[in-house]
Amino acid sequence: MAARLLTVLAALLSTTSASAYVRATSPKSGKPFVWLESCIVVQADGRGSQDLPIDVVDATLARAAANWSSLTDTCGDLRLTTTPARGMAEVAADGRPVVVFRDLAWQRPGGMPHDPSAIGLTTVFHVSTPGLPGDATILDTDIELNGVNFTFTTDPANAMPRLDTVIADLENTLTHELGHVQGLAHTCWDHQSDTPPSDDQGMPAPDCDGPLPQTVMDATMYPYALMPGEISKRSLTDDDERGVCNTYPNSQPQAACFQRVQNGGLGCGVAADRAPVGGLLLVLALVQVLRSRSRARSR
């Protein structure tokens, strides 16, 4: 098993250099997603996780948001922050970005099962009006976490997985998913679309199944984990930071978001009924390294 792991890692490495990020786009128009809100407040579902107390979940979500905001608040106009869990929350286009743990079944209530190899899933609710003003505006985002196939922890080195599960670092996972919340896509082509998306340099994103530049694999928005309990996605690369800062150029005082949090505001203020809304699933496949990558591929 160890030898096979080394083989997988070696096959992924490449000496080619690159420096680029990829933005998520509307499936119908191909236009990049963007928030018109300047402050995004994310909150955990009060039901929490079977693996961690809710106060630990709140603190970890806050750290994951700070992994972004500590770098992007000085150069970008989007303010990402969190508020403690309060009451039950569910995935819905309600203008309230939430994090929901799926501990009993890895699917939405009444919905189809999600890919069991995916540890986290972000749904982006957005305006879908190709060719018209407002197209690709993000209205809401919700994160689902796979507590059926993964054991969440904040200390992977000392954690014990539940039976038939794999260790997953919560901060690592949330930091990646919050990149999707802000409108970023994966740093390589994970075959969710028929053709590779373009990066900010206008070049096709490299195939996730091919040899990849180290810069692609090092990014927080790289869609795979190289080992169970990975924590490297807690730390942003320059490309991750530029993805947010270039999408939301700085023009608003930093205090605006925190004033809104104090006033109890949550999420998006754009009414979802003003235009057709669609949902895009962006999957982070943090899987056991020895599983085939075809199974791990995002849908």
Image (spheres, rainbow, N blue to C red):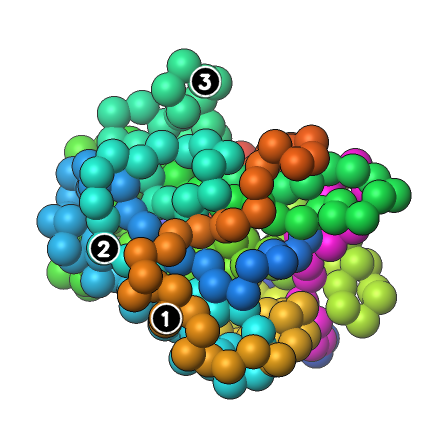
- What residue does disc 3 label? 111
Q: Are marks 1 and 2 in contact (CB under 8 Å)?
A: no
Q: Is 105 above or below relative to 195?
A: above
Q: From the image, state whether disc 1 or disc 2 is nearer to you.
A: 1
Q: Which residue is mark 2?
A: 84
Q: CA distance from mark 1 to mark 2?
A: 16 Å
Report if residue 263 is visible in the image. yes
Left or right position of 165 against 257 = left
Residue 37 sits in which quadrant?
bottom right
Segment tinted magenta in the rendering: 18-32
Residue at coordinates 48% horizontally, 63% vertically from top-left? 39
- Residue 188, image quadrant: bottom right
Would residue 280 appear left or right of 291 to someone viewing this image?
A: right
Dot 2 falls on a residue whose secondary structure is loop
Q: Is residue 299 above or below residue 69?
A: above
Who's the residue at 79% across and 58% down the image? Answer: 198
Q: CA distance from mark 2 to mark 3?
A: 28 Å
Q: Amino acid at mark 2?
A: Pro
Residue at the spot x=29%, y=47% of the render? Answer: 44
- Residue 257: x percent and y percent? 43, 69
